[in-house]
Image (cartoon, grey):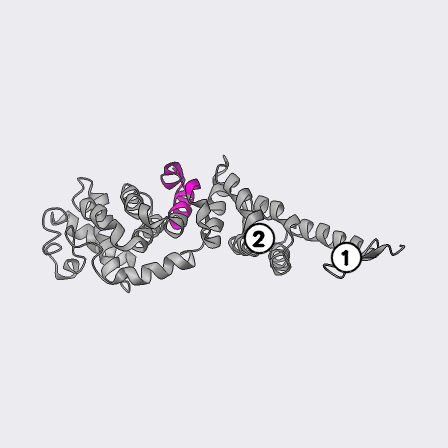
Amino acid sequence: MTVTGHDTGTGRVRGTSAGTGADAGAVRALRGLEDGRSAVRLRTALAVGTTPDPRFVDKLVERCAVEPDFFVRDMLTWALTRHPVSVTLPRLLGEVRSERAPARSQALHTLSKIGDRRAWPAITRALLTDADDEVARSAWRAAVVLVPEEEEVALGALLTTQLGRGGPETRLSLSRALIALGDAMASALAAAVNDPDPRVRAHALATDRLLRDPDAGFTFALEEAKRVVALGAGSGEAGDSGGSSGEAGESGGSGEAGESGGSEGARAVRRSGGEGP
């Protein structure tokens, strides 16, 4: 092919096979993201993130919504974080409104990893209370990363309305999100300790226990809290003694939630984006 000049910004030759080769490489990369073998998709996502190209962003976001392999999804998110926010943010903000739950969930997870607070208005009440547990979990993680300081208390109050929902993983995700808010959620958590629903009370007590003792396993903390609630100590007495057992007493209760030093580590979790997808 005839040489017609050079691109002074990149040093690449225009009008030569170099440009054609680059286009062919882009096509191969896009196809690789759809390969039937997860190992190929993983390597392709790694390559795309290593050499970012705005042309890949739409395909990366599209694949996030349908990728069945956890490790590949995580690599797709990483690849998106390697691209300019000016390109990725608008695409992801559109995706959180998708009718497909996996698309919403992974877009929220990616926003939490990018950490650009311009995305905060997209974290709506509807997402934070989404009926799909995976979407809600991703929304909680994104929210505590992106929330402006002046809205932390309101976020804590909203998140406590979700206490008691879902299975152990969902409950742990919510507890971590609340703990990440630190003192901002203290009064809301204290009120939840006295909730008439025993599931809410137990989850609130377990969250408080985990805040005070981050090394305590969540499953143990939750089972301990359930015993406290079953014995009738989960409401009026929690703020004083934490219930009838000494171990449960460590979780404190209504008057003291959020006052321990556990919020320092929680802030680090917020900065890192929290859990995986």
Q: Which residue is at 10% across, 47% downward? A: 236
Hey, what amino acid is under mark 1?
A: Asp
Circle 2: is it few (<14), some (14-19), or many (20+) Cα within 10 Å? few
Q: Is residue 130 magenta?
A: yes
- Whichever of labels 2 and 1 marks the residue nearer the N terminus, that label is 1
> Where 17 falls versus 132 (above or below)?
below
Tally of numbered tags:
2
Q: Which residue is at 58% across, 47% downward? A: 87
Q: Which residue is at 12% across, 58% downward? A: 245
Quadrant location, the N terminus: bottom right
Q: Secondary structure at mark 1?
A: loop
Q: Which residue is at 47% across, 39% downward? A: 101
Spot the residue most to the right: 2
Whole-percent x, y for residue 124 in the image: 39, 39
Taking the image as shown, residue 23 lies to the left or right of residue 177, namely: right
15 or 225, which is in the foreground? Answer: 15
Q: Which mark is residue 7?
A: 1
> Where 164 falls versus 19 (above or below)?
above
Magenta region? 121-141
Q: Which mark is residue 84?
A: 2
Instruction: Name the dominant secondary structure of the magenta segment.
Output: helix
